[in-house]
Image (cartoon, rainbow, N blue to C red):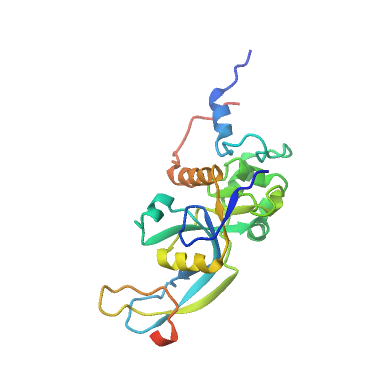
Amino acid sequence: MERPNADAAVLEGVGRPVAPLSGMIEPPCDVRTDELDLDELRDYQSVPPRQSHTVLVRLRQGGRLKPLPYPLDEEDS
Amino acid sequence: VESFWDRVEERGLRQGDYLPGCSIPVFGSSFTATDDPQEVRADRGDLIVVTQSCDLEQHKVRLVATCPIFPLAEFETVNPAFARKGRWNEVLKGRVEGLHLLASPTIPEDNRQALVVDFREIYSLPHDYLVEYASRLGPRWRLRPPFLEHFSQAFARFFMRVGLPSTIPEFR
């Protein structure tokens, strides 16, 4: 008789929400992704920004040389 | 489906705070420290705080670690493989370690409205900037227990994972 693999059962549970049990999002058992597809999923690309703008930075005077990652106000420029 | 999020309106930041539309400075390859003012690109993105709440509460951090968070449809435009049937279930089960799914703050029962966090990109932004920005947002969403701890654990698991050069052949 084949014994259930306890380790596999534990690993299968990794990443699932731990609580609450009632109302937990349970994935529908439709498609089982094979390992090849899983590699493709893990190789995902970063999503580019929806919007970018330009800020002006300058070195802070006096102290250590650190660029200011803030947009400069008019009175600062 | 129980709500993953609380609606809060306070200045203090906590782990799991959802901050849409933050500015993220991105230095180009040609950036150098000179006396002259320089232009730097700043991306706008939706972020979620990953720094531990206890560090934030005790003002131990000058910079706050955040990760980008996206609607599924936006993520799928760049990664169409995820649009295929059943693929998000693999993320839901924790099999794609860099990604973590969170239910929609407003329609948690609709999994297509869920949000995905990308742990591979971490932005450390000034604490003061994020506090001011969050206070200007007005009411905002904050992950609630135990979904917060589950999120935090997934982030930790992403960093603690170990790749082996080889392993025992799979049992078939």
Mark count: 0
- The quarter of the image holding the C terminus of chain A is bottom left
User: Toward the viewer: A50 or B84?
Assistant: A50
Point 55% across, 73% down: residue:
A52
User: Residue B167: horizontal and vertical position, in percent?
Assistant: 48, 33
- The quarter of the image holding the N terminus of chain A is top right
Point 60% across, 48% down: residue:
B4
User: Toward the viewer: A21 or B168?
Assistant: A21
Point 66% across, 47% down: residue:
B88
Note whether residue B122 is visible: no
Relative side of B107 to B26, left or right? right
Query: Can you tell which quarter of the image residue B12 is in?
Result: bottom left
Query: Can you tell which quarter of the image residue A24 is in?
Result: top right
- The relative height of residue A77 versus residue B8 in the rendered view (above or below) is below
User: Residue B125: horizontal and vertical position, in percent?
Assistant: 43, 64
Note whether residue B53 is visible: yes
Relative side of B166 to B106, left or right? left
- The relative height of residue B131 versus residue A77 in the rendered view (above or below) is above
Query: Can you tell which quarter of the image residue B27 is in?
Result: bottom left
Relative side of B120 to B101, left or right? left
User: Residue A54: horizontal and vertical position, in percent?
Assistant: 50, 78
User: Toward the viewer: A19 or B86?
Assistant: A19
In the rendered image, the residue lying farthest to the top is A1
Relative side of B64 to B85, left or right? left
User: Residue A58: horizontal and vertical position, in percent?
Assistant: 36, 80
- The relative height of residue B166 versus residue A40 in the rendered view (above or below) is above
Point 54% across, 44% down: residue:
B145
